Amino acid sequence: MLRKRLIALIVLTGILQACSNSGNKDKSDGTDVAKNMVKEVSQPVKNILFFGTSLTAGLGLDPTEAYPALIQNRIDSLKMPYKVINGGLSGETSAGGKGRIDWLLKQKVDVFVLELGSNDGLRGVPVAETTKNLQNIIDRVKTKYPDVKLVMAGMQMPPSMGTKYAADFKNIFPELAKKNNMSLIPFLLDRVGGIPKLNQPDGIHPTAEGDKILADNVWVVLKPLL
């Protein structure tokens, strides 16, 4: 009888110890999960400012179809802590951008994508003037946020603007990118410009399908910076 009681006592002790260990494990797991949740919530969100023309604004498209919005979708799918700010304005020139940039810099900017100059080119603005204005914008951004990552979107003009002008205009962007240590998108409209089915009736602004390609052109340069 005594032997049976001892065996029962040993079994009961083992059961109580197992329950205690299980409770401790569950508590530990719960703590780890809570810590991970806090870590995710507290991760600061950084801003990407796309500063440009109607190409960035997405003229003729739903705002969700413009390439900056498509970039935001990719960022969200990868759970990256970045928020895209669309600072595009239809008809914007480099001079207009120079007068507008300070207002947008009131919010923290961690990545700055500059897409300006195309309207200058279409108006035949001297290359030296466009270059000076773009450099002024870049200087203001760097002065306000010294650690900002910079991206330059290259643009081109059709030969109808004159062979020399078109060549000089095209060189603005890689030269400024090199001078200011900016990542360069060689040509924002690559694989879209001049292709009728990818452009709206005006022949200038991409369709929704065209903007998907613009997003690809931007993403291949932007992603490594994030």
Image (tube, rainbow, N blue to C red):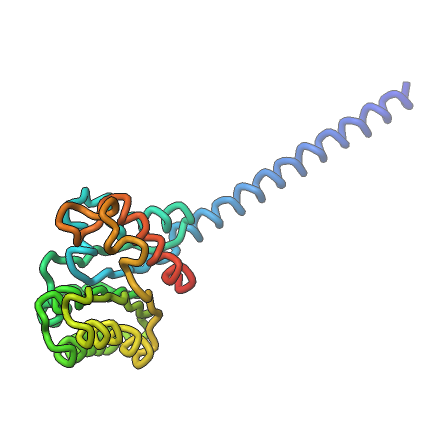
Relative to the observer, which residue lies in front, 189 or 161? 161
Residue 102 visible (yes or no): no
Kindly identify the residue that appears in the image at 22 percent across and 64 percent down: 115
Relative to the observer, which residue lies in front, 111 or 184? 184
The quadrant in which the N terminus is found is top right
Residue 141 x, y percent position in the rendering:
22, 73
Kindly identify the residue that appears in the image at 9 percent across and 60 percent down: 91
Kindly identify the residue that appears in the image at 34 percent across and 57 percent down: 217
Q: Quadrant of residue 134?
A: bottom left
49 over 150 or under it: above or below: above
Q: Quadrant of residue 142?
A: bottom left
Query: Residue reaching furthest top?
Result: 1
Residue 34 x, y percent position in the rendering:
48, 45
Relative to the observer, which residue lies in front, 216 or 190? 190
The quadrant in which the C terminus is found is bottom left
Kindly identify the residue that appears in the image at 19 percent across and 55 percent down: 55
Residue 47 relative to residue 121: left or right: right
Residue 28 relative to residue 148: left or right: right
Residue 37 relative to residue 177: left or right: right
Residue 44 x, y percent position in the rendering:
35, 58
